[in-house]
Amino acid sequence: MESTPDNNEYDMIIVGAGPAGMAAAIYGSRMGWKTIVLEKEAVGGLAAVTPIIENYPGFSEISGLEFAEKLRKQAEKFGAEVRELVEVTDIRTDQVPLVVTTTTGNFKAKAIVIATGTSHRHLNIPGEKEFEAKGVSYCATCDGPLYKARKVAVVGGGNSAVTEALYLDNVVREVYMIHRRDRLRAEESLQREILDNSKVNMIWDSIVTEIHGSEAGGVKKISLKNVKTGEESDLRVKAVFISIGILPNNELAKKIGINLTDEGLIKVDEKQRTNIPRIYACGDITPGQGQISVAVGEGTTAAISAFLDMRGGDWYGEEA
């Protein structure tokens, strides 16, 4: 392998610049570590495309883009380096420091924090991409309060979709739940709650075929098709919450042998350690609640754990 220049050697490399990764960067750099964040897209992750964030402590209302910019500025204030459009393709774990291979060159680090997050499963229908953040959402707790006096639709039939619909039932004017089958896939307790104790309108055996709206006004209606009868109809709603699952961005973790859950998320202990010494993980790529505040706490824990493990000298079982 080609040699790595000294200026590409760091104490900590963070893969992913969402809230978890940026929190790790803030804490790592404040502790005096030479820290770099490598992000294949843009700072902020999924939080950056959220129109309004209302549930992060300290901000009654802030746009996702503004929040992402504040994360960047705070990390850079303490000395962290942030590089966008740099994809990590491999990590060599058989030597110390660890060697990180990217699309722009190699880096070395004493510790690595993986915060690659997840991606939402998409319906891949007309209007979905066009109206994302303009009525199309993948997070009810993030965006539901924006539609308090409106009618909205939830697409899906599993635990997450039912939970989203039950939450929205207490927040918005009216909720329609659209599922392609004639019964839900959620746990029995959730099924009983939504079918017996809520005002959610169920639309069975149906799929959304198109999302309609305008550039200025956002989502206005959705087109439906009954998969059994073929009947087509339109439903006027102001927002569509798509909850058909997530896709963990775990390709890197798989490649280097990090242990994953059955759902493809990275297994970590209470210190955010993975099964590989010197490699930590945090945020949505690990099991959790999928909330910004939780991700920030995990990123903080990962950075502090790495710092203390280094000071302890044994890296939880490995000779320093």
Image (cartoon, rainbow, N blue to C red):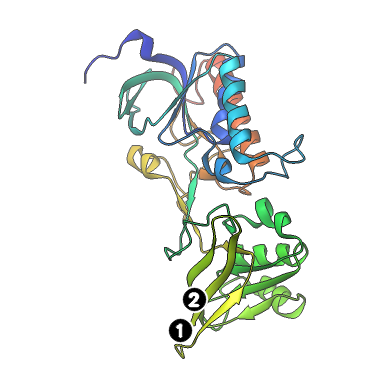
**Horizontal and vertical percent position of residue 201:** 68, 78
Q: Which amino acid type corresponds to the residue marked 2 in the rendered image?
A: Ile
292 w.r.t. 77: above or below: below
**Residue for point 62% across, 15% down:** 30
Which residue is denoted by mark 1 in the rendering?
A: 227
At label 1, which amino acid type do we have? Val
- Please determine whether, in this image, residue 265 is positioned above or below residue 310: below
Tell me if residue 135 comes above or below residue 41 in the rendering: below
Q: Secondary structure at mark 2?
A: strand
Horizontal side of 29 relative to 10 (left or right) equals: right
Residue 175 visible in the displayed image: yes
Visible residue check, residue 157: no
Q: Nearest the camera: 74 or 15?
A: 74
Q: Quadrant of the C terminus?
A: top left
Q: Number of marks in the image?
A: 2
Tell me the distance, in whole angstroms, between the alpha carbons under discs 2 and 1.
7 Å
Q: Image quarter for residue 217?
A: bottom right
First in sequence, mark 2 or 1: give its number: 2
Q: Where residue 44 sits in the image (x, y, percent)?
A: 54, 36
Most distant residue in the bottom direction:
229
Mark 2 closeness class: few <14, some 14–19, many ≥20 residues within 10 Å = many
Q: Is residue 241 left or right of residue 121?
A: right
- Spot occupied by residue 37 in the image (x, y as percentages of width and height): 47, 25
> To which residue does mark 2 refer?
207
